[in-house]
Image (spheres, rainbow, N blue to C red):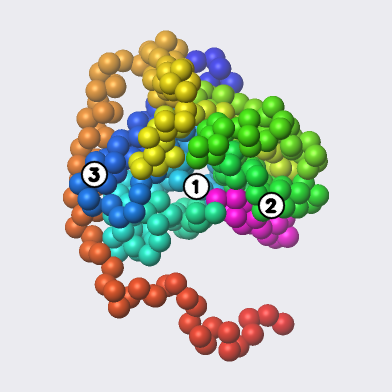
Amino acid sequence: MEAATELGLDRIDLVGMYRNMLLSRSVEERGRTLFKQGKIPGSFYTGLGNEAAAAAVGTAMGPDDVGAVIHRNTGVHLARGTEPWKILAQFMGREDAPSRGRDGNVHFAEFDLGLITMVSHLPAMLPVATGCALAFRIRQEPRVAIGWFGDGSSARGDAHEAMNFAGTRQLPVVFVCNNNQYAYSTPTRLEYAVDHLAARALAYGFDGVVVDGTDLLAVYREARDAIEKAREGGGPTLIESVTLRLEGHGIHDDASYVPRELFEEYEDRDPIERFHRWLVEHAAFTDDEQRTIESEIKELLSEAVKRAEASPEPAPETLLDGVYAPHDVFETPHFS
């Protein structure tokens, strides 16, 4: 427990993050079942293998911080307080879901919880997070923005532009790269020439760190330090969380391009199993506690599915509601 205590985490915090990871994976497993039952439109994407980083960064965020999340970050939504039934309703495109059935099945966030909805062009969210950080600076608010992206996103111009802008102005923003080692099917050796994406941070004028994305406490340590440094005026940080998707890019992808040995290596480093072993060894976590959490999650998801399925599909005539601003919003200038 000494390592956790140094991070300001008590046993309740540790078990809470472990529960977050279990719940995150369970929500996505339930989503996979709903997809196979024909209840989820489109394809389906999960964060299998990314649970530690999502739970850690989501927990490290302050209550007034904001984040531009991506589809591998279910644990961030849960850490911020999104209810599982809303996530399942989102998967199924229901009216009571965060996006009210008007966007992709994993394109969602609850703005009231400090999260900003993603778009498919994932690096386009980094300028959004950077813009939030600029607003915090202008308003002199002690808040931090977090922007997530994948290793494939690092090849696009908007990722570069966001980091360059944030670096020149030393904005309170943290960039978190979920490095899954494959941008869809392209291996990292064909994505960039440096050994680690975090090395690019130096050129932008801020710190970059590489962390094992399967190690919950290691990610939490780097996220906590980066967020607090940004809050205190120390500027951005690029955190490269190295892990592996434990399945394909989406449910439609068999990931046949990933060497079997690499899959086996990261299956042995499954972040949930890894932290479970740590809890047993260092926090006296018991089998009874494990069974209790599993039972609670099973019951929670059973009710969540019922509530999500009870939510109606959006009526076709309301398709454009909330999509466009009313025409008269521009008739009177809102600035002087």
- Looking at the image, residue 205 sits to the left or right of residue 125; the answer is right
Which tag is nearer the camera, tag 1 or tag 2? Answer: 2
Most distant residue in the top direction: 281
Q: Image quarter for residue 250?
A: top left
Q: Which mark is residue 36?
A: 3
Residue 287 rendering spot, x and y as whole percentages: 27, 16
- Taking the spot 23% from the left edge, 64% from the top edge, the residue there is 312
Q: Give the CA distance from mark 1 to mark 2.
A: 18 Å
Q: Earlier in the sequence, mark 2 or mark 3?
A: 3
Q: Nearer the viewer, residue 246 or 226?
A: 246
Query: Is residue 117 something one can see in this rendering?
Result: yes
- Looking at the image, residue 60 sits to the left or right of residue 207; the answer is left
Q: Nearer the viewer, residue 185 or 37?
A: 185
Most distant residue in the front direction: 257
Residue 216 rendering spot, x and y as whole percentages: 50, 26
- Taking the spot 25% from the left edge, 18% from the top edge, the residue there is 288
Q: Earlier in the sequence, mark 3 or mark 1?
A: 3
Q: Which mark is residue 232?
A: none
Q: Earlier in the sequence, mark 1 or mark 2?
A: 1
Q: Kindly identify the amino acid type of the residue bearing the numbered disc 3.
A: Lys
Q: Kindly identify the amino acid type of the residue bearing the numbered disc 1.
A: Ile
Q: Image quarter for residue 194?
A: top right
Q: Are marks 2 and 3 in contact (CB under 8 Å)?
A: no
Residue 280 rendering spot, x and y as whole percentages: 38, 13
**Quarter in which the C terminus is drawn:** bottom right
Q: Which mark is residue 70?
A: 1
Q: Kindly identify the amino acid type of the residue bearing the numbered disc 2.
A: Gly
Label 2: which residue? 157
Label 1: which secondary element:
loop
Q: Give the CA distance from mark 2 to mark 3.
A: 36 Å
**Residue 236 on the magenta span:** no
- Taking the spot 68% from the left edge, 80% from the top edge, the residue there is 335
